[in-house]
Amino acid sequence: MFDKVLVANRGEIAVRVMRSLKEMGIETVAVYSDADRKSLHVRMADEAYHVGPAPSAESYLVIDKILEVGRKAGCDAIHPGYGFLSENSEFADACADSEMTFMGPRGKSIDAMGEKTRARTLMKEADVPVVPGTENAVEEAEEAFEIAKDMGFPVLAKAAAGGGGKGMRRVDEAEEFIDSFKGAQREAISSFGNGDVYIEKYVVDPKHVEIQILVDEHGNGVHLFERECSVQRRHQKITEETPCPVLDDETRREMGEVAVRAAHAVDYVGAGTVEFLLDANGNFYFLEMNTRLQVEHPITEMVTGLDLVRWQVKVAAGEPLDFEQSDLEQRGHAIECRVYAEDADENFRPTPGTIDLLSEPTGPGVRVDSGVYEGMTIPVNYDPMISKLCVWGEDRDHAIQRMRRALDEYVIAGMTTNIGFHEEVLTHPDFLDGSYNTEFIPDYMANRDKPEPKHRDIAELAAVLATHRHDEALRDGDGDDGEQSGPKSRWKTLGRYRQLGRL
């Protein structure tokens, strides 16, 4: 087993990984940029090292800097988290060359699944169903247009590298295609340094369902069931749940077997996720494989009872899985809401800033994976995710009720967040009956009336009254509300903030 591990990431995922490492008695090392000097993951680590300016291209993405820290700190392994260098085959190979174990798949497996057209070919050879599309990237927009016409609209112009919805354009009409294709190429170059784009048939109104897999270096592989990830904005997930509310047992079993087969086809080792599109008739198609830990892994942990990070560490240390597929079962239902500093009323515009007041929900079945604290500033340089709020319930209805309660308890003051938007999602009829698909948010936002803040009239009257009382207190020489001068009670502030509907 390892003695010291460098966590080559930031924010909530770095904190989450460190927690499992500490439970295993393993020392932790953090890296941080100028913007993250006071971040929670830096405070939690046993050691922390500065790696450069705020831009990730000058800090978290510089392989030589990360490896230098690992060597200096005497680390024997590196955990990449997700994002940044987690799916970089050069980094995986460089770790091995530096005699530090990379807690993820081998570089060749990352390469095999990281380039989507190559992955599609490999999946076809492994008898994994794929969405119809071109075998290779298409360079010229005019050639791509002819392919799209033959395929029939709608289609997707899709970057061959990367993920997260970058370099992807849905095209519904022929006259939109050329501009959309060129736009996808530009964004792919900007995001991934690779402008290759291929054409894929768009599956109308699909569900996005993914399968968590875990494979050791001894050839043992299992799936840890599915996650439903169709609540997305700009092709990025914000709400996930497991089990999928419409998946039958036979399709679940078949998808799981296909996912494990896909992993074995590229000699995969470690934790990973195979993503599928599920159409209205129950047919599923390979979409891509994420060769890393997923953001939404906590809900799988909640229904299986397994610690995925702990198993990443054990597999990286060469230990075999000590369970088989037949030993695994889903228990209850879990939901995750990604809490972002963003404004849903402004097309989900990021709203970074300082957290003036923070009260996270607790209680039975509630888990908050967070990388922040009260007084901390959410920097403008990175993804504005604040935390992942996860709940477990005995069944789906219970989980939804518990999530509503948890969202109602969650208070973040100092910036606009999407907590209120999550509350809208969890009361929408399409979400409640499980029929939602990947067009859920675009369709909802197209017809959504901007909600009035809770208790607006009461809040306005309370604000006037509070000002009046404050002025009276100053005239009388007293503190807040006639009380003795001094700092205002945090709990009084928190109570008022909740009472006024988080205004």
Image: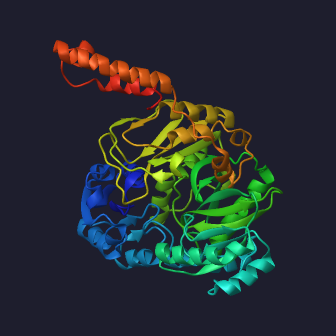
Which residue is at a point 51% across and 80% down the rendered structure image?
194
- Name the spot of residue 232 as percent of width and height, x first: 61, 54
* Vertical order, 172 against 391 (above or below): below
**Visible residue check, residue 478:** no
- What colour scheme has been applied to the protein in the rendered image? rainbow
Q: Whole-percent x and y of residue 111?
A: 54, 78
Tally the numbered discs.
Answer: 0
Residues 480 and 366: in front is 480
Answer with left or right where residue 89 lies relative to residue 226: left
Taking 59 as reference, is 456 left or right? right
Residue at 65% from the left image edge and 36% from the top image edge: 427
Where does the image place residue 113, in percent across and percent down from the top left? 59, 74
Q: Residue at x 70, y 87 (%)?
A: 143
In front of the other: 337 or 291: 337
Instruction: Judge left or right: residue 460 versus residue 249.
Output: left
Q: Position of residue 134 (x, y in %)?
A: 71, 80
What residue sits 30% from the left and 63% below the top?
54
Q: Is residue 369 above or below residue 366?
A: below
- Quadrant hosting residue 434: top right
Q: Nearer the viewer, residue 194 or 350?
A: 350
Q: Residue furthest right?
A: 281
* Residue at the outermost left position: 477
- Image quarter where the N terminus lies is bottom left
> Can you see residue 408?
yes
Image quadrant occupied by the C terminus: top left
Q: Is 133 placed above or below 300 here?
A: below
